[in-house]
């Protein structure tokens, strides 16, 4: 007997798509800085420098707006020759509609581009997609990213059901 079982899906999962237009506020100093814990391996700002972050995500640009989510995770300088940082964080929603739901994100910044959505929980169970990000403000004190979130997810508590529901287990 095999140590695994395969269950082919005879019907596609019922998936939904979400699009959100939000702003990530990375504030280093000023009246409302984000908490960061810097772990320095070698000279500060050089290869291997790691920071733990807790950034506010808002529906309008600017750190003074109330957060609808938090970006909590870490980023580390991953290039010896360029200003590239690998980052991995969870977006944890705080607003009433998606409270406690998360999107797990990873990618490279500060360059404009895309980050991967590799997983989700709560309202965004089994999420996958991308976040298109643009830096719209940048100074010594703060950086504001415009986020365009595109994700597919399967709501496991949904009353929606696929028209066929036959699974076959086999070794």
Image (tube, rainbow, N blue to C red):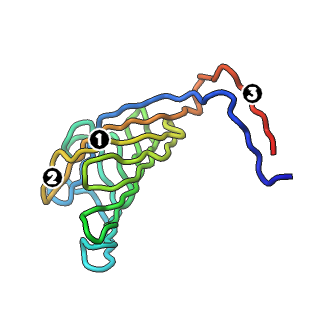
- The label nearer to you, 3 versus 1, is 3
Mark 1 packing: few (<14 Cα in 10 Å), some, or many (20+)? Answer: many
Q: Which of marks 3 and 1 is nearer the N terminus?
A: 1
Q: Which of marks 1 and 2 is nearer the N terminus?
A: 2
Q: Where is residue 112 in the image (x, y as percent from the top left)?
A: 25, 48
Element at label 3 = loop
Q: Earlier in the sequence, mark 2 or mark 3?
A: 2
Q: Is residue 31 above or below residue 147?
A: below
Q: Nearer the viewer, residue 99 or 124?
A: 124
Q: Where is residue 90 in the image (x, y as percent from the top left)?
A: 42, 50
Q: Nearer the viewer, residue 88 or 115?
A: 115
Mark 3 packing: few (<14 Cα in 10 Å), some, or many (20+)? Answer: few
Element at label 2 = strand
Element at label 1 = strand
**Residue in the picture at 59% in, 33% down:** 156
- The label nearer to you, 2 versus 3, is 3
Residue at which label 1 appears: 147
Residue at which label 2 appears: 138
Cα gap from disc 1 to disc 2, whole angstroms:
15 Å
Q: Position of residue 22 (x, y in %)?
A: 29, 38
Residue at which label 3 appears: 166
């Amino acid at each position: 007997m095999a140590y695994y079982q395969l269950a082919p899906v005879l019907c596609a999962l019922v998936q939904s798509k979400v699009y959100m237009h939000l702003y990530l506020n990375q504030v280093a100093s000023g009246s409302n800085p984000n908490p960061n814990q810097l772990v320095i391996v070698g000279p500060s700002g050089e290869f291997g420098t790691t920071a733990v972050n807790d950034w506010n995500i808002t529906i309008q640009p600017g750190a003074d707006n109330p957060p609808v989510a938090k970006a909590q995770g870490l980023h580390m300088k991953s290039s010896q020759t360029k200003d590239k940082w690998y980052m991995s964080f969870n977006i944890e929603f705080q607003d009433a509609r998606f409270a406690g739901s998360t999107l797990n994100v990873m990618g490279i910044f500060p360059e404009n581009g895309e980050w991967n959505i590799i997983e989700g929980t709560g309202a965004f169970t089994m999420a996958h997609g991308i976040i298109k990000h643009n830096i719209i403000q940048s100074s010594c004190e703060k950086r504001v990213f415009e986020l365009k979130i595109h994700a597919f997810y399967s709501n496991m508590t949904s009353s929606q059901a696929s028209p066929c529901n036959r699974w076959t287990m086999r070794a």
